[in-house]
C-alpha cells in the first residue's frame, strides 16, 4: 500500500470515528432528555453525566472511539459555555440589589479560596482542589471545563471533579428545600439560597422548585450572577499559573481561553437587548443540548475504580466545600440581602 493510500485510509478511519463519537454523544444527550421528562427532579445535565458514567464503566463503548469522543466532548463543552453567555444580561445583575450581589461575590470568594485551603489541609492535589473549588463555587461541570485548560492537573482530576459536582449537587436538590425553613429561608429567599449554593443550573432549578415559580426565577438570576464570575476567576488562576511557570520553560496557559472570551462577548450581546426572544429561546435549547452531550462524554471518562482509589479525602473535600458554600451563602443572604 502506498503512502498516499495509507493517508487516505487513516483520514477515512478518523472521520468515521468522529462521526461515531458524535452519534454516541447525541444518543447520550437524547437519553438524558428522556430521563428528565420521566423524572423531572433529575436535570438533563445531571442525567447526562450519570448515563456517561454508566456507559464508560460497562463494556459498551469501543476503545477506538474514546479519543474522538474526548475531542467531541471538548468542542461541545466550549460551544456550550459560549452559548451560556446569552442567558445572562448585565441588567439582570443590577436588579438583584447591592446586598444580594455582595452576598454572591463573597460566597464565591469564600467558597473558592476555602475549598483550595481545605484541599491542601486534606492532602488533596492542588489541581483537583482548584477544579473542585471552581465547579462548586461557580457553575459545576462547565466551570471545571473552563478551568482545566489553565491549571496544572492530571486527566483523572477532571473526571473526579465532575463526579463530585454531580454527587453533591444531586444531594443538594433534596437538602436545600428541607433545610431552608429550619434556617429561616423560605419562598423567594430559599430560591436565592439555592442559586448561591447549588452547583449546576439544572440542580438549582430542581432545588428551588418546591418553593414555587417565584423562587425558581430568583434562583436562576442569582445562579447566573455566579456564572458571570467564571471569566475573572479563570483569568486570576491563569495569571497565577503563568507566574509560577515563568522562567521554567513550561508552556504557559492563556490569560483567558478563547471560548471564555466568547462567553463574555455573548453576555455583552445579550446585554444590548437587541437579541429577539425566539433567538434567545433557541440558544437556550442549543446550550442544553451541547452541554448534555459534553457532560455525557465527560461521564464516560469517569473510572469508578479510579474514583474509589482517590479515597475518602476527595469525597470529604466535596462534602466540606458544599457545606462551606451553602453555609456562607445562607448567612450572607440573611445578613446583607
Image (cartoon, helix red, strand yellow):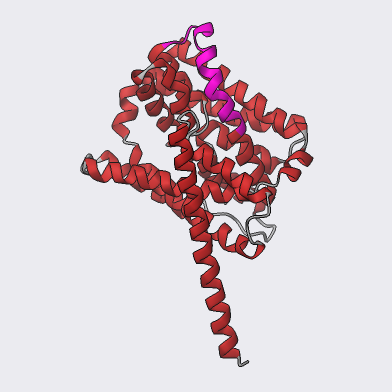
Q: For the view shown, which residue lies furthest in the front direction?
A: 38
The percent coordinates of residue 240 (x first, y second) are 60, 44
Nearer-the-camera pick, 219 or 230: 219
Q: In this rendering, is residue 32 above or below 253?
A: above
The percent coordinates of residue 188 (x first, y second) are 38, 15
- Would you say 80 lies left or right of 94 here? right
Q: Going 53% across and 8% down the picture, which residue do you hit?
A: 183
Nearer-the-camera pick, 141 or 270: 141
Nearer-the-camera pick, 189 or 299: 299
Magenta-colored segment: predominant secondary structure: helix
Q: Going 70% across and 57% down the picture, which residue do you hit?
A: 248
Quadrant placement of the N terminus = bottom right
Regarding residue 74, the answer to whether it shows in the image is: yes
Q: In this rendering, is residue 171 above or below 26?
A: above
Magenta segment range?
167-186
Q: Going 75% across and 45% down the picture, which residue do you hit?
A: 306
Q: Quadrant of residue 317?
A: top right
Regarding residue 233, the answer to whether it shows in the image is: no
Q: Going 41% across and 31% down the picture, which residue do you hit?
A: 225
Specify whether residue 170 is painted magenta.
yes
The percent coordinates of residue 200 (x first, y second) are 50, 34
Quadrant placement of the C terminus = top left
The percent coordinates of residue 51 (x first, y second) are 57, 44
Specify whether residue 271 is painted magenta.
no
- Would you say 69 lies left or right of 91 here? right
Amino acid at each position: 500500500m502506498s503512502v498516499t493510500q495509507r493517508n487516505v485510509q487513516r483520514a477515512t478511519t478518523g472521520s468515521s470515528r468522529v462521526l461515531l463519537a458524535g452519534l454516541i454523544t447525541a444518543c447520550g444527550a437524547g437519553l438524558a432528555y428522556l430521563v428528565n421528562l420521566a423524572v423531572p427532579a433529575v436535570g438533563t445535565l445531571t442525567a447526562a453525566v450519570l448515563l456517561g458514567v454508566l456507559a464508560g464503566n460497562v463494556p459498551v463503548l469501543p476503545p477506538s472511539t474514546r479519543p474522538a469522543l474526548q475531542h467531541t466532548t471538548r468542542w461541545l463543552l466550549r460551544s456550550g459555555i459560549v452559548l451560556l453567555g446569552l442567558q445572562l444580561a448585565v441588567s439582570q445583575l443590577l436588579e438583584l440589589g447591592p446586598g444580594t450581589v455582595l452576598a454572591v461575590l463573597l460566597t464565591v470568594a469564600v467558597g473558592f479560596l476555602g475549598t483550595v485551603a481545605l484541599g491542601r489541609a486534606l492532602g488533596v492535589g492542588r489541581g483537583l482542589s482548584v477544579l473542585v473549588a471552581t465547579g462548586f463555587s461557580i457553575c459545576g461541570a462547565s466551570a471545571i471545563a473552563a478551568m482545566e485548560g489553565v491549571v496544572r492537573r492530571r486527566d483523572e482530576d477532571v473526571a473526579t471533579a465532575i463526579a463530585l459536582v454531580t454527587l453533591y449537587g444531586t444531594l443538594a436538590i433534596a437538602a436545600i428545600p428541607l433545610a431552608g425553613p429550619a434556617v429561616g429561608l423560605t419562598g423567594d429567599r430559599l430560591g436565592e439560597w439555592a442559586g448561591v449554593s447549588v452547583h449546576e443550573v439544572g440542580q438549582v432549578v430542581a432545588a428551588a422548585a418546591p418553593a414555587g415559580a417565584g423562587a425558581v426565577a430568583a434562583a436562576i438570576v442569582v445562579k447566573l450572577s455566579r456564572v458571570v464570575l467564571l471569566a475573572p476567576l479563570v483569568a486570576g488562576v491563569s495569571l497565577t499559573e503563568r507566574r509560577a511557570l515563568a522562567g521554567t520553560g513550561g508552556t504557559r496557559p492563556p490569560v483567558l481561553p478563547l471560548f471564555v472570551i466568547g462567553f463574555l462577548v455573548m453576555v455583552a450581546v445579550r446585554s444590548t437587548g437587541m437579541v429577539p426572544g425566539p433567538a434567545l429561546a433557541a440558544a437556550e435549547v442549543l446550550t442544553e443540548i451541547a452541554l448534555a452531550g459534553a457532560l455525557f462524554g465527560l461521564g464516560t471518562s469517569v473510572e469508578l475504580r479510579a474514583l474509589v482509589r482517590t479515597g475518602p479525602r476527595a469525597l470529604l473535600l466535596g462534602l466540606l466545600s458544599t457545606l462551606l458554600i451553602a453555609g456562607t451563602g445562607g448567612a450572607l443572604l440573611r445578613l446583607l440581602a
